[in-house]
Amino acid sequence: MSFNWVKEAELSLKSVSSAAEIIETQYKNLNGFRTKESPRDIVTELDIAIEHYLVKELSVSGYHIIGEETTSDEDIGPYLNQPVWYLDPIDGTANFISSVPFYAISAGLAVGFNFVAGTVILPALREIYFISDIGTSFVNGKQLKSDSADLKSSLLAMAFSGTSYNIPQRKKQYQAFGYLNDNSRGCLRTGSAAINICYAASGRIQAAVGLSNKIWDIAGGLAIARGAHCKIHLEWIKGTNRVNYIVGSDGVTQEIAEYLRINKIADIKPVSDY
Amino acid sequence: MQDIVFIGAGAINRGFLPWIFDISKYGYIYVDNNRKLIDEMNRNGKYSTFRTRKGKLEEKVVTVKKAYHLDEFSISMVDNAAAVFMSVGPRNCLHASTVLKGTKCNIILCENDPESVTIVKNALNYNHVYFAIPDVITSNTAPEETLLNDSLAVHTEDGILFIDEDAGNFVGDINFCSKDELRKQWAAKLYLHNTPHCITAYLGALVGARYLHEAMKYPKIDEIVSGAMKEMLTALKLKWDIPHDFLDWYAEKELRRFSNELLYDPIARVAREPLRKLELDGRLIGAAQICLSMGFTPENILIGIVGALLFVNQDDPDNHLAFIRKSLSSKALLTYIVGLRQGEALEMVMEERYLKIAGTLEKLIKEDSI
């Protein structure tokens, strides 16, 4: 089967890897930060600089670009059925400013729910996840391929939005976190949704779960997961830039989806069902 | 009659090992994941392996008792195996070993990576797994005129098989040796054979050569390969307590091998999986690190490393390297893909010279392309 997004895959690899050099050369001169919607929602001048750089580089594709630092909810809807780049200049900024190495630069190209190309780079951990010219996913040149697993033998990771948009819903999210943590080998919260998904694609963990995450946090990771033949369950929360998702190995993703549905936390369907 | 089971029907198992055993004493069973090859083995029931010896070719007709596709084989199908020889490539050991669950005989790995023994032992929870070093160059094919008569024919050298002495319960022309001797042989094989051998292949690929001996006919390639050999010889003499006359003899023997016109050793085979050959403790990066740690910069091995990074073959499992190279800076290529640490000596030397060496190699392509 031919892969029709070779130029875009190349562009994202080139742009995101170059953007990582901005962090490497400028992080020592980092001059403070500010918070946005919550104490966890942090932006630095490097977030802004990297987003501007990526927007400039990716604009040669002619596709619409939606980035974390420059987009509001209203920007999302009209573009869903045409190719859109989703950017997160630093996913895990709270980790970044504390020198915790779990942060990533992420860019993903999607047409609707089909995440076709993307790159996620972890500068501090020297890992680069990308889609190749044949549509398969790699980390540092090694091919990724998802396997199957059940919940009790899985290590998981979960990501929540920085803000509680709905208090009862938030309680249910934490209930889900507790359930998954107690019924598996554990549920991590790395602080980077992009890293969670890439780790699931690489088989280090068996599933990444996200509730009310911003689409730009995960678009690059979802492209990587697709190229690693992961199971992807995705629910776009209507009229917003937020999504619920379960990504990872066959078996465990289905078990988690059923738990979330039965407990009325989220109804997240496999991507192929849309 | 006992059987020997060969997992992998490529160069070593098909071409070299049949010369080691007395054909009248063992039945040969082959297992491979190449359906066409397996069907042909079963249809023909035999094939020829040609050995170069003293400048002449000798032929041995090998009778194939039975051949199986990997997916359809289990060791339980063989009642009286004397030994299993596995040669499938280090990346494929884990998967291939699944068919050996429940084996009761020794498993000998001719895998160009001692670590593969641990992988198979752990996968099978079985201790009788041993490392072997085939000191030989074996092609996985033969000249076209030979293939017309026998599509399974292969060419090999007259080599030596070194096996861990603990595995010695079967008969053949085998050099069973101590673990110390095996370590010495491995150091020589890895750095005086594998290192210059793959450099020859990567440079040969750049000028469009098909076989190794064709590459060695280019004076510049010969000069770089001989230079790399001298660098490794110097490093090994400084680093390890291995007799110098053994190392000198080994190096001289290897250089002669690379030019052997009777072998028809395909460059695509030797250059296969460049990312594996660029592993940190392997034949290129590991070799360069030893030289640097001994106090000198291995200029010719650095050329080989760049040659590996420039390798293009659409049929190679690592062909995505070409895509990566187009998109990443040399610094990102060296740190993210090769895995060098930022600021370490080899990273700094490679980063400084990468573009210059790549330019020199491009000149080589223009001047010397076939």
Image: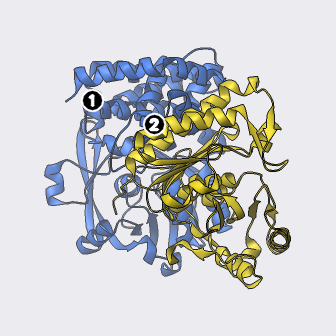
Chain colours: A yellow, B blue
Task: Tell which residue pokes out farthest to the bottom in this image.
Answer: A262
10 Å crowding of disc 2: few (<14), some (14-19), many (20+): many
Mark 2 lies on a secondary structure that is helix
Task: Residue A251: tell me if it is visible.
Answer: yes
Q: Nearer the viewer, residue B240 or B338?
A: B338
Classify mark 1: helix, strand or loop: loop
Residue type (three-letter) at the residue carrying disc 2: Ser
Name the image quarter holding residue B235.
Answer: top right
Which chain does the numbered disc 1 sit on? Answer: B
Residue hosting label 1: B207
User: Horizontal and vertical percent for residue A255?
Assistant: 69, 79
Please say if the residues under marks 2 and 1 sit with CB atoms less than 8 Å apart.
no
Note whether B345 is above or below B167 in the view shown.
above
Write the residue at 30% across / 65% down: B37
Q: Which residue is mark 2?
A: B327
Q: Amino acid at mark 1?
A: Val
- Is residue B137 among the parts visible in the rendering? no
First in residue order: circle 2 vs circle 1: 1
Say whether residue A148 is left or right of residue B137: right
Mark-to-mark CA distance, 2 and 1:
24 Å
